[in-house]
Image (cartoon, rainbow, N blue to C red):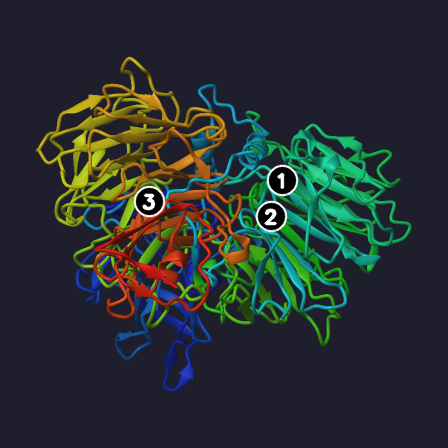
Amino acid sequence: MTSICKYLIFIILTMFGMIHLSAQEPFIRQQEMIMREGKLFSGCADFKFAVVSDHTTLWSNDATSFDASEPISSVRLEVKDGIFSAILGQAPLSPFFYELLKLYSNASLLTWVNTGNGFTLLKEQPIDPGIVQVLDEEENRRRDVVREIPQLVRAEGIKEDPLKPKRKKNPMKPDEAMRQRVMQRADENGQIPMDGLVNGLRHIQNMPQPKDAGLWNWEWLGPGNIGGRIRAIAIHPTNPNTIFVGAVAGGIWKSTNGGSSWAVVNDFLPNLAITTIVYDPTNTSIMYASTGEGFYNHDALPGAGIFKSTNGGTTWSQLASTNNTDFRWVNRLDHHPDSTGILYAATRDPHRIWKTINGGTTWTNIYTSGLPVLDVKVSPHSPYNRIIAGTQGFGTPNWANTGDVFLSNDWGKTWSIETTGAANKLPNNPQRCEVTFCANNANWIYVSIGRSKGEIWRSTDGGSTWSMRSNSYEYLGGQQWYNNCIWVNPNNSDHIIVGGIDLWRSTNGGTTLTRISDWTKYHNNSSANSAHADHHIILQHPNFNNSTNKTVFVGNDGGIQRMTDYSTGTTTSGWTNLCGTTLGITQFFGGAAAPDGSFVIGGTQDNDHLRYKPSGSWSGAGNWYQAETGDGGFAAINPSNTAIQYSEYTDLWIQKSTNSGDSWFDAVTGLSDAGTNALFIAPFVMDPNTPTRLIAGGASIWRTTNSAGNWSSIRAALAATDPPLCSAIDIASGNSDIIWVGYNEGHVARTTNGTAGTPAWTRLDNNPTALPNRYVTDIAINPNNHNQVFVTFGGYEPNNVWFTNDGGSNWVNRSGTAPNNLPSIQVNTVRFHPSNSNWVYIGTDLGAFASEDQGQNWSVDPRYPSQGHEFPANTEISELFWQGNTYLIAATHGRGMYRAQPMTIIYVDKLAAAGGNGTAAAPYQTVTQAVNAAGPGTVISIKSNTYDEPNPLLFYKRGHVKTTNGATLIK
């Protein structure tokens, strides 16, 4: 800058420590225009700055401001047409700003300016990633051109403020989550079988008539307005109101009104991980869907091959040719542009590109890669001979740096490697590669590669030569292996959109980019302010013409959104959330309910903690409340004061609400494992006897006795280096001294003096019958007999459910007795029935199971199609929990939450008050009501009287009927 005003370069030492300046100098631009005498000011001005949170100054020019007051010293900066730019790393601001964005979610910048008439306080400016910008080398010289970046890099040498810890929420951290997911499902040798889900499904289909401990009549609680991860979108070519989406853990859904409402399709597909949906362009009654999310994210589910519909998506059937391990992870399908039944498939294991010319009857391997194939595209230009594919490595020492692009010009007969690193070729080891042809330029091809957190490359001669368009925007945000997609305007090949954590638009072939979405601005109502985070697919409206129709759709970790005009949309305008109120694909990790059902809350994958209410504002299955975005985990609600609620961000970062979940604040004082030494989704539970007491688990076991005001350790870490991490906790109902804990390597322990200052712990997993050395997924103590405990383990094994009748001295495998034994499937959660201890429920990767004899025999949940009550098939249940003693709630990872009422006894009294619920305190008035509410195994107790039922009674579920107080006549 040539101005006489010079930036004062300081080496600043503060409570945060030494500051290390970045090679690229981030800076902030004030949003409010600086005026003098009614005109935009240009020239030198004096500035004072303070960063404040809750009216407490976190940092200022000279550390003299403590209560948001004006600092003493100032610095001189240049103002051009009312705008100034303050370089971070130089006075007055420093790389502290990076850290403040992460640590202080409600921080603001206060700016005082003096243009010659004294200092005036400008409008308070909330600190937000959108106002922090960076200069590249060319711009650093000019210092007058700016651009936004989606994520900020952590500055070196800065420490968190121990007096007021804050944690800035980020979009999903798939690498950390993936490690836990693999850990949960691996056997003792670290292996996960490729065919685990398919074999489990076959076992379920052969199980006998269910005896399901009262389970039936599941009620869907939602949410219908939040969404979940979508990798597949298909819009009918001639009827744009018909839209199909594929959820990676929730199956195929269909809208017939342009996304206003949704209905699940073919709920009983043997696998629900949908990655691609394509139409046959010559016959839109024929559709194909691939399964198996082979992108290595933490909650990826393997597939069951490729499915085909011949009636426009109403019903689907598995292609027999893909019912094998070659098609367990089908990442992408593409259909030949004008020939029926010719498709290409990209698979992870084996690393291949497959081709069928007969609609999937048979498949031929046309290319074997050294790396997993993630993308394949066919040129839209006749003679359709050109095919391009992208790969990315995984599992190798340098997997993050590997990847390739392959090109064929002869329908897949021969291939060339484009990523050789040679002159005019794509770089070697570019990381994940997403590829696309251009509809209006036959020789143009784009590739979005993961290197440099996002680079755009283009060929304008059919792949003979390539040139890099840009590499400095970091649009993939460090998650390039998880979220990476690219779209080209079919009418103008210079107009593209790339997607990573956010979406970016270019009108010059990728040379410069403008961010058009901001995940921090996303909200869950239908009038979305922006798009959700982590983008996987972008496609245009079928009638897109780049003039009267410029609509594009995006699929991401929050479902599906629409931008009406891609060319004018911004980070906060032009967006519509198409989840509506009926797209039930949210992925929960855990949940909790108020005893009266007034609140149900839960933590989700990349949608934070959500809240359900049955009535009032933000209520109903289609209108859950979302306070923030990010990953959530377990949850708890104080039954004595339901306004007090607890949830967590990742790594045991516990948060608390005192206003029924409207807002949240951190509650981790003293909890030193939080954020550093805990599982990605770490357990914490509320004491059922004393709700001000909570127990949490990281490497150590932690306790609070004052509603998370502060925490202290009650069991030290089990090892000084790389200790096992707590994965499950339970506290005995009726006795707070009895606490059980489990760890991610199979360690199980109990204390019988858990309220003491230093409880004594006894290890129980290495008794005469040793428990598995696998991940402990859950623990359930019988509320009526504390010596009876279930412990469940991860892995696709036949011995995942264990039971003790004597407080852990002896163990028996309670995975059932053939033919009523459980499949070798991942078991995630276990619960006793509160009033009938023989009834036990588990949640698995393939739905719910129940036992009426404490696990000696198991049954899959019953389905009564004629009654219209169906639990979502083959869906992972992350946690089962009780609403009081009446309702069992299932938090699923891909279909939201469901609720059932497994009543052991239903009471009927003709003279009871109207509106009863079948309990002893509020009996039903008619036998018909009881029959409709009863599940398998339920006892219907009818008080003596004459009952005039309006219709003939059909007892279509197994159970018992008894009368009390004399004879009963039913007619």
Closer-to-camera residue (966/67): 966
Closer-to-camera residue (552/971): 971
Identify the residue position indicated by label 1 in the image. Answer: 432
First in sequence, mark 2 or 1: give its number. Answer: 1
Callout 1 amino acid? Arg
Identify the residue position indicated by label 2 in the image. Answer: 484
Instruction: Indicate whether 261 appears above or below 367.
Output: below
Instruction: Indicate whether 56 appears above or below 703.
Output: below
Number of the front mark, 2 or 3:
2
Q: Quadrant of the C terminus?
A: bottom left
Callout 2 amino acid? Asn
Q: Are marks 2 and 1 in contact (CB under 8 Å)?
A: yes
Residue 426 in view (yes/no) = no
Say how many tags the image has.
Answer: 3
Residue 528 image position (x, y, % from top left): 49, 68
Callout 3 amino acid? Ile
Closer-to-camera residue (240/944): 944
First in sequence, mark 2 or 3: give its number. Answer: 3
First in sequence, mark 3 or 1: give its number. Answer: 3
Identify the residue position indicated by label 3 in the image. Answer: 19
